[in-house]
Amino acid sequence: MTFKKSVTFVSMLGFSLVMLYPFYFMIETSFKSKEQFLGAPGHSLASWRKLTSAMPVWAQLTNSIIVCAGAIIIILILSTLAGFSLAKTRFRGTPYFFLGIVGAMLIPLHSVIIPAYVNISRLNLLSGYWGAILMYAALGVPFATFLMTSYFRGLPDELIEASIVDGLSFARVFLRIALPLSIPAIATVVVLQFIQIWCDLLVGLLFLQNPANRTLTVGLGALSAGRTTDIPVLMAGSLISALPAIIVYLIFQRQLVAGLTAGIGK
Amino acid sequence: MGKSALQKEKSRTALLFGIPALLFVFFLLGIPILQSIYYSMTKWNGLSTHWIGPSTYIKEFSNPIFWRVMQNNALLLFSVPVAIVIPMGIAFLLNEHVYGWRFFRSVYFLPTAISWVVIGMVSLRFFAQEGLLNDLLKGIGLGFIRTDLLSSERGALAAVAITFIWSMVGTNIMIFLTGMANLEISLNEAGRLDGANNYQIFRHITLPQLKRFIQFSFVITIISAFTALFSLIFVMTGGGPGFGTTTLEFFVYQSAFAKGDFGTGAMLGLILFVIMAGLGVAQLALTKSKD
């Protein structure tokens, strides 16, 4: 029995190395100069010093935060309202509402990206943050609504109806009772959307036309496609971009898992 | 408040609360998917569009590059079983709860938080001539293989597929761990009392209980393979060499935004939509038939 356990332990340890190797590679490479990466011995801070001139890291970090925050706020407002409506106010139209919003999960980004790009450019929204914020929000709302609906369904109907009978309006019940009770679901939506938007390239690449508005991930993607051969600098940039997502992941691992497995149903 | 007044208030709230999300999704995703149909039947010169009917479809269906791209998508499907079986095995190991399993679980999930852009950049160095892969091959005495996977069409696709499998491990482990947490252990004991061996217990007791989770991870993995690899391909190969790693989603981007052919891009996007919707309906039918 102990033999079997130690074999399991060793193979899990070995597999950890496979999963951690990219992080080791990024850290180790970022502390080399270009020459050291190509074979010269030793480590240095040269690439970290060059990073800010190769890409405006701090501005891009700010852009990432603005885009993420903007999209997540829209997603939260729309999905909590719609989720409450779908779960707690059953009326004739509910199934169609549900299908209309949640069914949009089936639409891949690439199938709508060309008309969406044209529409948003006609509205002159490609140069600021709004184009990307709106697209990220639209892509996030269907799944977030699905999550919020399933969560609100778990709240007892009696609780809502008793409060209504007591004279509270639906709006009050939503704000005072349903929302505070749904903090875990809201946290799941926030964490999942944060990771998705933070890590995305395509929407940012197309809908943030002004290079000054680029997010960190888009900045990295553009830099790596630009035939830059300064790999240590790229790795330093990668580390900066990965760090916020890793921190969020380490703190909210449980919410992330809940979000990723929410589609399985009961 | 009377019963009918309550019902009226409910309907009013339902509309008031539900309509913003519905309209938002309709304008940003619903209308564009309809526009895609129109665009796919037009020629676009940057300023105006003019109607050309289904000729883009006819042109693409006789274009060998289009079929090459479809073939790449089909080849990617071969990575799907691997991206399911490996995480399932690891989930079983984790589920034995040996010393440090919580730590290992966190390590395995970690890539889920990392952008494919970053993963692609590291992967590019891993597969390069001077990369770790060749060092490892040399280390185990297979130095003569010394590959440059990324320089050949099939090799580059294999490199993308391997990176994809690596990135899916975390998500699929999560799915299987969720499934294994709900296993009925008492059934195993009953099976053992009836004289079943380990394999029989796995095959006839464990696997059926995990069916729903295998199905779910299967769908998630295919969806990712077909619609989430853009950044990886963009960073690792740019679709090349040749069209070796151009998948349908990447072809949409290339046609529309690199070549400026919006009509063809829209048509390709629609084909992707039909494939994904078909998959969604199939999944729904499977789940329904089981209930």
Image: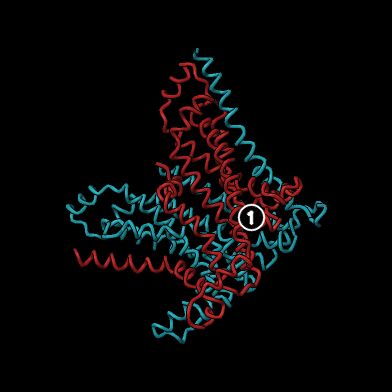
Chain colours: A red, B cyan
Residue A172 left/right relative to A1: right
Disc 1: which residue: A204
Q: Nearer the viewer, residue A101 or B216?
A: A101
Residue A238 left/right relative to A203: left
Question: Chain for mark 1?
Answer: A
Q: Secondary structure at mark 1?
A: helix
Q: Residue at x 56, y 36 (%)?
A: A77
Q: Which amino acid type corresponds to the residue marked 1 in the rendered image?
A: Gly
Q: Quadrant of residue A123?
A: top right
Q: Is residue A173 visible?
A: yes
Q: Nearer the viewer, residue A180 or B172?
A: A180
Query: Which quarter shows the N terminus of chain A?
Result: bottom left
Q: Residue at x 48, y 47 (%)?
A: A191
Q: Is residue B158 visible?
A: no
Q: x and y percent of residue A36 in the render?
A: 52, 80
Q: Nearer the viewer, residue B157 or A43?
A: A43
User: Dot 1 surroundings within 10 Å: few (below 14), some, or many (20 or more)?
Assistant: many
Q: Residue furthest top?
A: B2
Q: Nearer the viewer, residue B154 or B284?
A: B154
Query: Which quarter shows the C terminus of chain A?
Result: top left
Q: x and y percent of residue B290 in the render?
A: 41, 44
Q: x and y percent of residue A54 in the render?
A: 63, 67
Residue B143 left/right relative to B57: left
Q: Name above or below for residue A108 compared with residue B84.
A: above
Q: Residue at x 26, y 58 (%)?
A: B200
Q: x and y percent of residue A56 in the render?
A: 63, 61
Q: Residue furthest bottom?
A: B144
How many numbered circles are shown?
1
Q: Name above or below for residue A213 compared with residue A156.
A: below
Q: Quadrant of residue A228?
A: bottom right
